[in-house]
Image (cartoon, rainbow, N blue to C red):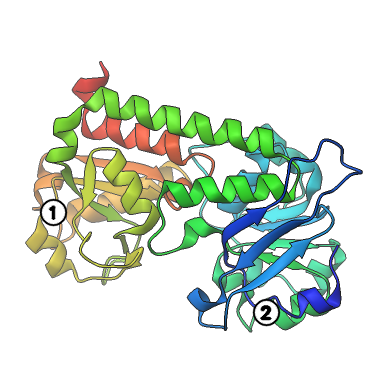
Amino acid sequence: MCSKKMFSMMMAAVMTVGVSAGTVSAETDYEPVTITLNLQRSGLGENVEYTFTEKPSAVVASGEQMADLFFDLGLEGQMAGYTKGNCWSTKSEFPASEKVPQLLEPGQALSNMSKEKLLETGCDFLIGWDSVFADKSFNKDFCEENGIAMYFPYVCSDQATFEDLYKDYETLGKIFQAEDVAAEKVQAMKDKIQSVKETIGEDAYKDPVEVFVYDSGEDAPFTACQGMPGDILKLAGGISIFDDIEKGWATPSWEEVVERDPEAIVILDYTGKDDIAAKKEFLETSEYTKDLTAVKEGRIYSASCSDMQGSAGSAATVEQIAQQLYPDMFK
C-alpha cells in the first residue's frame, strides 16, 4: 500500500488537516490521497505528509468508537477485525458488526493483543487512541516495519468538536473511496443537531444546564471537561461543570464536584444497564454526592461512552441528552 520510504516518515497516529484527492469512480482507479500527520500534537516530531496510493484492505479498529466509523461508512468489507473493548457503543448498533471478527473477548483492549496476532490479521491500517501506538503496544517502528498505516482520529483531540468528527468522516471517505457516503453521513449529523437547536431554542444556550459527567472513579471522579464530550453537552443545551479545565478529560476531587453542585449528572454508559445502575447507586449513597442538587432532584441520566468520545452515534447522543435535559421541549 505504501513504500518503506514513506512509512519511515510516519511517527504517530494523529490525522489532521489536508486531504487532497479527487473522487474516484472505480476501485481499480485509485487517485492518491495525501494526508498530514500532526506529530507535534503527540510530541513525537514535526508534521509530515503521507500519501496513500492504494485503498487499505485490512483495517483493525481498536474499540467500537473506531469500528463504528467504518460500519457507518459501509466499509466492513475493508476490515480485518476489531475489538469491543470496555467502552461499548450502547447508543448506535450496526448489523455489519456481526460480519467482522472480534479479535478479543469483549472488555479487552487491543493493547492486550500480541504483535504476532495482529500481524496474522494482515492489518494494513490501524485506528485507535494514542495508547494503541505506545511503545508497549504497536509503536511507530513496529507499524513501519510491517506496512501498517496508523490513524489517530481528529476527534480524539482535547479541543475537538463536531467539526473534527466531520473531518474524520471526510478523510476516511477519501482514503477508502467512500466520499459520497461520508458526505451523506456528515449532513445527516448536521441536520439532527440543527433539529435539536430548533427544538430547545436559543434560551437553552444562553443559560445552559450545568452538568457533571461521571465516567468512573470512587476515590476521585474521572470526568469530561472540553473536547468532544464538552461539545456534545453544549449542543444539547448543557455545559460541563469543569468546562474551565482545558482538557478533554480530567480527575478533579469530589470536593470540587460538591462545590460546583451540578444541576444534572450524565453517567457514561460502558456496557449497558448494569454499568449505569452501579454508578447511579454510588452517586446516591456516597457521602460526597448524595446531597448534590442533581441527585436530590433525580436528574441523573446516561449516555454512551463510545459516542460521547466522538463516533457514529454522537449526533444522536446530542439529541438524547437534550431530551433528558429539556423533556418538556420534546413532547
Task: List x then y, in percent, for residue 115.
Answer: 77, 75
Q: Where 194 falls versus 317 (above or below)?
A: above
Q: Name the amino acid, label 2.
A: Asn
- Relative depth, front residue between 81 and 288: 81
Residue 180, percent from left and from top: 67, 33
Asked whether, in this view, residue 214 is left or right of residue 161, the answer is left
Name the residue tied to disc 2.
139
Q: Position of residue 109 (x, y in %)?
A: 61, 64
Relative depth, front residue between 268 and 191: 191
- How far apart are the alpha carbons under marks 2 and 1? 44 Å
Quarter assignment of residue 110: bottom right
Tally of numbered tags: 2
Q: Quadrant of residue 264?
A: top left
Task: Decide: is 276 above or below 153.
Answer: above
Residue drawn 60% across and 79% down?
134
* Label 2 secondary element: loop
